[in-house]
Every structure is written in structure tokens, then in C-alpha cells.
Amino acid sequence: MNEKLMAVALAVAVTACSAPQKGVLSIRSVNQQPSGFAQDALARGDLLFSRGEYALALDAFRRAVRNDPTDAHGLNGVAISYAAMGRHDLAREFFELALSRAPQDARITRNFARSLTAQGLKGEADALLAQAGAAPAGLAIAARPTLAQLASAAPVAAPVRPVQLTGVELERISLGEVRLRTMDRAASAEPQLKTRIVTVAGAQARPELSAPIVTVGLAEQAPPAPQLASLDAGSAIPAAAPLQPNAQAHDRLFERLWKSIMHPSGRKGARG
Amino acid sequence: MIWALLLAAATPPAEAPPVMPPAPQLDYARLVDEAIDGGRIIQADAMLTQWRAQSQAGDVQPIEIATARMALEKRRNEEALARFSALGQGGLDDCRVDEGRGIALLRLGRSPEAVDPLRHAVGACADRWRAWNALAVAYDETQSWALSAAAYERAFQLTNKPAQILNNYGLSLLKQGQAAKAAVIFDRARELMPDDARIIANGDTAYVMAGQEIRRRPIDTADEWARRLNNAGQVAMRVGDLPLAQAYLSRAVTEADSFVPEAAAALATMDAAKP
């Protein structure tokens, strides 16, 4: 009799636990959410992504992936959200995981190739598309010159820099100091060796002044700079700067200087 | 008991999982190989795990090859060498095994031993640019310049990563003392991979050795430029051009936003060495 009573009590208790009740907290593992939850998260992610709300889309896709780490749709969603936010480094991991789950999904391959192209990795993108059969392999390779031809070619031209920046240049040394860099045409081979320190006295303490107090030494001959060894006459040295920058150049320079004093935060990292 | 049975029958049964159609069998051997060749190590690793879980009788050796290649890609060179050697000793004749063994030997500093397996690899599979590239590097170590140039040429025409071959060929030219040619090659490599720190540093080295001035790029920050100046100064020191070294190192110290200890230490050493 006691056994029967115990069995009935146990059955009642089990039923009470298994049936959902209003007001009872139910805790489940994230991996055991009903499948509808993952589908909802994916649909929400797709919708948010199509609206351009990439951070929210990322959150939705991540929820879907947390629920099912093998779901290629969710992994691809996380990857494209990261890529849309410019985080191609993070996108790569999820593209690769998505491809591992659905290696024949041309959509993932194309997205990954776009991300690689956006990073400047065109060769890798082409190789990926070629592996997936989406692009013919070897087209770019066929037109490649030989190494010997490349090595004997003329040096690549130096990137052209504005003459004003090449000739005369201001650099902020500290809050109270800027460096005025000057160079002449003849000395263009050693363009950075003649430098001068220009001190702007108390400029930060007197922002109400209407014009900068700048003491610039006259362009007397700078101390002889160390000669660079055996400079190659045929090399791609940057374009020569004018011997003496004209007054207009100086005006522009001081205008820049004044702006930099009034708005010092904008100067950080803008040198050279 | 009857009560218990009735109550148990009253509870709703668990929802049966939907019947999924069987997934098509993937060609894991090809897919993992392609992922490794493409440098997609995360994908290759994940697929190798799936492959092991679904492996069949004939998959043992291909899985072992893929495992050895993964070890090589993860720079576990000793393990890779052991795995490739075991596969080779088992009588397996496969280009990937020879190539992997040669590259592992090369990375472990055993370049004379690497030449034979690499030559065997390119002899059997002439389209493998990694094997040609590794063979060229091995020839460089033995100063067989003509052979290395030919091997680099083959690798360059086959590869989808030309910047890597250009970088290695540039280093080969530097070793041969052809710094001006090397500078041109590094410029080409830098066009393809403008932000690769190794290519930039190697290019600057070639410029200094060729007696040319290094150039600041518009995107270089003050600290990046200072690092390049410091590198150029160190190179000038090694080639014995102390005035040039001093000029570069001084500029590295003065033009950086933050302190450059290497340049400062080198300058102090030069000052101390002065009579």
C-alpha cells in the first residue's frame, strides 16, 4: 500500500514539474531553445541587415549562432554584419566557419570574396571564386611579366606629394612648439636633414590673440647636413622643392600654423 | 499504479524531431586541400574535424595527410616533419607529402636536406607553386643563384600570391648583392600589398643598401615612419655607413611621437665608440 502511495505521489510530482505553469521560472540551456527561436533570430537578422542596421543584425545573427553553432545561415549573417561594419578581420573567421558547414554555398563564397576584395586581397578573392567554380582560374596569372623583366624595369615613380608640403612643412613638437622644416632644391636628396625648431611662445595660454606670435629665423644657411652615401642619380627621389618658398607659401603656412594653434586637436597625426 | 499510468499518458509527448534528408557526402579530401591551399585554416580545421567524425575505411591516409598539412600551416614544424616522414616511409608517393616534408625541413633550418624532397615534389607535380617557392629558398641557402632564380620564376607564374614570391626573390637579390634590383622588386611587391610590414622593411633595407633615400608614405604615422627610419639606420650601421646611420637614427628619435629605444640605444653606442 505504501509503495502504491509513493508511486502516485511521485507521478504527481513529475507531472507537476513537467507541465508548464504560469509564473514558474523556466531555465533552459541556450542550445535547447526551440527551433522557432533560431528561425526568428535569423529572420530578424536578415530584416535588420536589409535595413542597414548592421549592429542589431549582428546581435540577432549571433543569437541564432549561439543556439545552433553549425548553422551556415547564421554564421554567414554574422560574417556579413562584421564585414558591413568594416571589421573584415572578424568577418573572416565566420566566413570560414560558414564555408566549413556549407562549402558549396555560392552565396557565402561570393560574400567572402567581396570582403577579401574590400581588404585589397583581390588575388585571394579570385582564387576563392576559382575554387568554387565561380570564376575562371589563371586569367590574371597568364598576363604576368617575368621576374627578370620586373627586376630590370625602371624604378617605380615616387608618389607625388604637394610641393608646399615637400618644400616647407610644419610639425607640432609639443603644445608650445612646432618645427619648421625647410629644404632647398639642391639638397632634395637629403630632404629631412635640415630642420629648425620654431617656438611659439605661450600660444596656448593666449588664445584670444588675433594673430600668432611666430619667431622664424631668417633663411640663413643651415648647418651642413651629413651627406648620404652614394646617392643613385637615377633613383626616384621626390620632386625637388623650391629653394626659397615664396611669400604666399609662407602666408599659407602661417595660416595653417594659426589654425593648428587655435585647434590643436585637429593637428594630431596629420604630420608629413 | 493505474493512477501513475493514467498521469503519464496525460503528459504531452515530446515533439519528434523533423525528419531531415540525409546530407550529401562531401568530398572532404578536396575541400580541405583547397581550404589549406587558400590559407583558410579555420575552415580547413573545422572540415577536418567533420571529416574525422564521418570517416570511412579509405579515409585514413588522406586524413593523415591533411592532419600533417594542418600542422605545417600552424607552424608546428617538428610535428609536421614527423607526420610527413612517417607517411613517406609508409611508401606513399604523393607530391603533398614531399612538399610538406621539404618545407618543414626548410623551416627547421635543414635546407640541404630539403632540396631532394622538394625537387621530387616539383618533378611529380610541376604546378605546385609552394614547392617551387620552397625549392628556390633552399637553393638560395646553397647560393645556387641560377637555380633559385628559375625556381622563383616558376613559382611566380603559378602563384595566386605574387607578393610573397616577389618578397622572397627580392631577398634573394639582396643576398646576391643586387640591392638596386631588389629595391625595384620590393616596390612591385609593395604595390600588391601596401601594408605588409615585412615587405616595407625589406624594401627600406634594399633602398639603404642601394644608396637610395627611403620615402615616407602619406599613410605613415609618425611612429611608423620612425620605425622605418630606425630600421634604415640599423641597416646603414651594418653596412658600415655610420654617418648615414646616425642621420637615420637621429631622425627616428626626433620624428617619433613616442620614444624609440632601439634608435636611442644605437645612437648611444655610436657616440660611445667615437674617439
Image (cartoon, coloured by chain):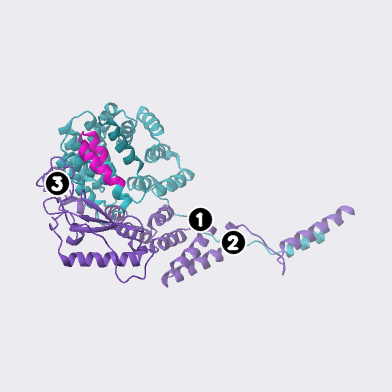
Chain colours: A purple, B cyan
Q: Give the amino acid at mark 3.
A: Leu
What's the magenta region?
A: B232-253
Q: Is residue B248 magenta?
A: yes
Residue occupied by mark 1: A69
Q: In screen coordinates, is B165 left or right of A263? A: left
Q: Residue at x 30, y 37 (%)?
A: B266
The quadrant of the image that shows the N terminus of chain B is: bottom right
Residue occupied by mark 3: A150
In the rendered image, residues at marks 1 and 2 fall on the same chain: yes
Query: In front here: A143 or A158?
Result: A158
Sequence-first tag of 1 and 2: 2
Residue lying furthest right in this view?
A1
Q: Chain of mark 3?
A: A
Residue occupied by mark 2: A33
Q: Residue at x 34, y 67 (%)?
A: A262
Q: In screen coordinates, is A175 left or right of B139? A: right
Query: In front here: B145 or B118?
Result: B145
Q: Position of residue A197 (x, y in %)?
A: 27, 54
Q: Position of residue A250 (x, y in %)?
A: 20, 64
